[in-house]
Image: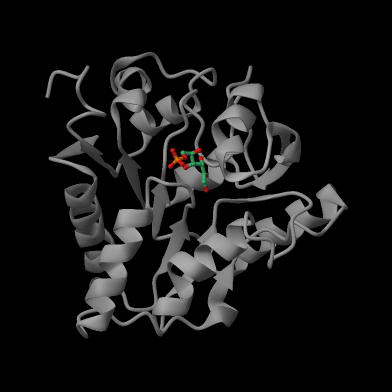
Amino acid sequence: MNVIKAKDYEELGRKAANVIAAQIIMKPNCVLGLATGSSPISTYKELIARYELGDLDFSGVSTVNLDEYKGLTKDNDQSYYYFMYNNLFKHVNIDLARTNIPDGTEPDSEKECARYNKVIADIGGIDLQLLGLGHNGHIGFNEPDEAFATLTHCVDLQPSTIEANKRFFASADDVPKQAYTMGIQTIMQAKKVLMVVSGADKAPIMKEVLYGPVTPKVPASILQMHPDVTIVADEAALSLCDL
Ligand code: F6R
């Protein structure tokens, strides 16, 4: 795995944006797999800045997001659609018809997962998948488990994930208990993976992901098996790693 160390969160955003910008410039009709959460926000800000400078063109880009809370509508300010629209899509010249996010309002999990798998297959797979890293090693909402889940599925969120996300809701009780997420196989089939990790609180899991055994108990550890992974992490997140 190629690890790029950034001084802080802002520099992390610039360095991660370099990788994504290179992808868009080299293949203007690329498919980007996108993530939500706090980790990629500085990266999205930097991509927007480069678009505003005239250095990036999103008109041919398609996107597939990793996940969405089950039960939230697009206009709910905690939905991942709302996040993507407000943190990236509305600021750049992307065609919204080419953006894809699991439909949190579809109550039939089997139907929605099959639809989303077909979306990803029809689009021709993912050129570059952007990931954050959960404190328990989750990627997307692929939580620690006995086995790696493969394709899009509906998950029950773990208490630690609900705890981590409750800061965005009125209370822990308001955090949705389920989510649709892309599976590990789909993530592993992306041609390139870019993971952004920030903060001292992520240092222990960062160390496990880089140096620990590959195990479904630390879902992101599977990235050790991917042929083209770049991790952009700040000094705090890498503080327990010998780099
Ligand atoms: C979000 C996602 C999650 C987050 C992870 C880290 O689409 O898939 O796996 O990347 O929970 O979240 P932050 O970046 O908020 O620490």
Residue 194 seen: yes
Position in image of residue 153 (x %, y %): 71, 43
Residue 124 seen: no
Which residue is rendered at x = 53% and y = 60% of the image?
A: 83
- Pick the quarter of the image with the N terminus: top left
Q: Tell me which colouring the rendered structure shows.
A: one colour
Image-based side of 131 in relation to 230, left or right: right
Position in image of residue 38 (x %, y %): 42, 46
Image-based side of 118 in relation to 57, left or right: right
Question: Front-most of 135 and 78?
Answer: 78
Residue 133's place in the image compared with 168, above or below, is above
Which residue is rendered at x = 31% and y = 64% of the image?
A: 45
Question: Front-most of 157 and 112?
Answer: 157
Position in image of residue 94 (x %, y %): 45, 80
The quadrant where residue 175 appears: top right
Q: Residue furthest right?
A: 108
Question: Front-most of 180 and 82?
Answer: 82
- Pick the quarter of the image with the C terminus: top left
Which residue is rendered at x = 25% and y = 54% of the image?
A: 13
Position in image of residue 99 (x %, y %): 55, 72
